[in-house]
């Protein structure tokens, strides 16, 4: 049987602090409605996140699958990841953040995550990653023969009402997102 992946694309702003409880509620809904054997998250193993806390409360195994700084250095991507990832600009009188996707470095990280996620004897996974990784990571899992069900948390009504829509663009081989800023930079 092909491994089953429930992939959640999130905004890292509420990964560690879900002030409204909306993300936690969504996690509980997903976990109660699906058989999930392992929760994997774009986080280092030493970080406390909402998903990790929720997994602990439910007695579900959780693993942080992101690379440490040392692993990024060994992989030769630390310098690229040290570049500014976003910048603010004013668009139609509204301050917007444009965030960039670095295909080389992010591609290496995503392959690393997959190597940490897929395990013998486990059939069903909840994988949590940043929204910019959502489509590329889903494609990589499918290439490995996984069945992927994707949920873009940033498209949920509670998210859009609080943060505004997150728009992801792809053009001329580049990928970026734009979203309004809550405050002027």
Image (cartoon, rainbow, N blue to C red):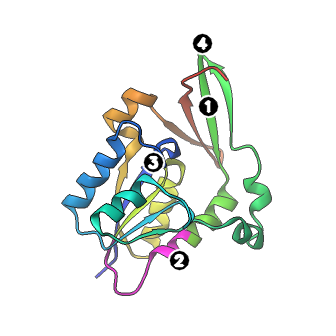
Whether the residues at callouts 1 and 4 have beta carbons within 8 Å, the answer is: no
* Picture residue at 22% right of the left edge, 63% below the top: 34
Q: State the image coordinates of residue 118 (x, y, percent, origin top left).
A: 44, 78
**In the image, which disc is placed on residue 97?**
1
> What residue did someone put label 2 on?
115
Mark in the foreground, 4 or 3: 3
As displayed, is residue 21 above or below residue 96? Answer: below
SS category of the residue bearing label 2 = helix
Label 3 – label 1 distance at C-alpha: 16 Å
How far is mark 4 from mark 2, CA to CA?
44 Å
Task: Name the residue furthest left.
Answer: 33
Q: Please indicate, yes or no, whether residue 98 appears anywhere in the rendered image.
A: yes
Count of numbered badges drawn on the protein: 4
Q: Which residues are magenta?
A: 113-124
**Mark 1 / mark 2, whichever is N-terminal:** 1
Q: In which quadrant of the rendered image does the N terminus lie?
A: bottom left
SS state under label 1: strand
Is residue 113 shown left or right of residue 23?
A: right
Magenta run includes residue 105: no
User: Which residue is labeled 4 in the image?
Assistant: 93
Residue 149, image quadrant: bottom left
Q: Which residue is mark 3?
A: 10
Give whichever of discs 4 and 2 has the lower sequence position. Answer: 4
Circle nearer the N terminus (2, 3)? 3
Marks 3 and 1 in Cβ contact (< 8 Å):
no
- Mark 2 → mark 3, Cα distance in angstroms: 21 Å
Furthest-bottom residue in view?
A: 120
């Amino acid at each position: 049987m092909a491994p089953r992946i429930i992939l959640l694309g999130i905004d890292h702003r509420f990964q560690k602090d879900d002030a409204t409880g909306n993300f936690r509620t969504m996690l509980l809904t997903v976990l109660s409605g699906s058989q999930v054997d392992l929760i994997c998250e774009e986080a280092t193993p030493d970080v406390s996140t909402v998903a990790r806390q929720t997994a602990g409360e439910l007695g579900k195994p959780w693993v942080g699958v992101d690379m440490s700084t040392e692993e990024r250095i060994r992989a030769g991507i630390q310098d690229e990841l040290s570049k500014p990832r976003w910048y603010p600009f004013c668009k139609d009188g509204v301050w917007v953040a444009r965030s960039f996707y670095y295909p080389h470095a992010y591609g290496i990280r995503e392959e690393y995550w997959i190597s940490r996620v897929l395990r013998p004897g486990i059939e069903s996974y909840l994988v949590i990653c940043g929204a910019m990784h959502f489509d590329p990571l889903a494609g990589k899992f499918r290439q490995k023969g996984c069945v992927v069900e994707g949920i873009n948390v940033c498209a949920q009504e509670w998210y859009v009402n609080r943060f505004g829509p997150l728009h992801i663009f792809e053009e001329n081989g580049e990928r970026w997102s734009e979203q309004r800023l809550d405050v002027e930079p």
